[in-house]
Image (cartoon, grey):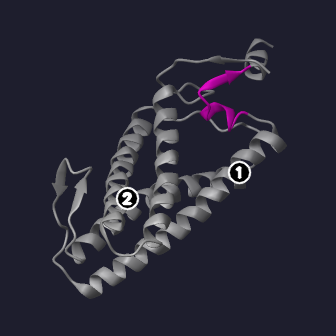
Amino acid sequence: MGAIVRIRLRNDELRYGLVAQLFHWTIVLLVIAQFVLANLAEDLPLGPAKVKLFEQHKSIGITIFALVLLRLSWRWINPVPAVPPTTARWQRAAAHVSHALLYALLLAMPLAGWLMSSARNFSVSWFRLFTLPDFIAPNERAFEWFRDAHHMLAKLLFVVALVHVAAALKHHFVDRDNVLRRMLPVKLEKERHEETR
């Protein structure tokens, strides 16, 4: 099945544009990197290597937070493609809820991590280029609360992301609609055929 590259910045009625796709796939890759870094750091003894991994983890978390805010801004001024008309009403509702939950988790997790670091009197820098202000004063009980919240949010994000992936694959392989294809940076031959029918 052939494919051609589509260079369109804005969304249209059928597909996401390049800007939305870049936001989506960059955030996906960074979230995967976050889970890898967190697991690697947890397995290390306290020392320079562990501190370095957590510094990278924090920097990427702040990057995700900023990208999600930019993505939401772009989504507000550039509406998303319409859901296929064959999609059941309950699936549309579930999609809205899962997307809202994903955005909320992608914003809440970095904030919880930032608060956790502040409560432990650990600075949060962005790739050592600048240091972010502390949200709260050092407090051991607050640190434990935000640490637990950060871990719980991570588990919830993992589950919701799996459901999101499963739904996209179901649309592609079972429903055979364009829900997954519209977020891909290439336009498949099948789509070209559908548009020319």
Percent coordinates x, y for residue 30 in the rendering: 46, 48
Q: Are marks 1 and 2 in contact (CB under 8 Å)?
A: no
Assign a secondary structure to mark 1.
helix
Q: Is residue 82 left or right of residue 55?
A: right
The amino acid beneath tag 2 is His
Disc 2 target residue = 57
Give the crowd class for mark 1: few <14, some 14-19, many >=20 residues within 10 Å.
some
Q: Residue at x 42, y 79 (%)?
A: 148
The amino acid beneath tag 1 is Ala
Q: Residue at x 52, y 47 (%)?
A: 28
Disc 1 target residue = 167
Which residues lie in the magenta part?
Answer: 178-188
Q: Is residue 83 left or right of residue 102?
A: right
Figure quadrant of the N terminus: top right
Residue 1: image tag = none
Residue 174 on the magenta span: no
Q: Residue at x 18, y 79 (%)?
A: 138
- 1 or 2: tag closer to the N-terminus: 2
Residue farthest toward the top in the current orientation of the protein: 196
Alpha carbon separation for disc pair 1 and 2: 28 Å
Judge by depth and name the residue closer to the eye, 57 or 2: 57
Residue 175 visible, this angle: yes
Give the crowd class for mark 2: few <14, some 14-19, many >=20 residues within 10 Å.
many
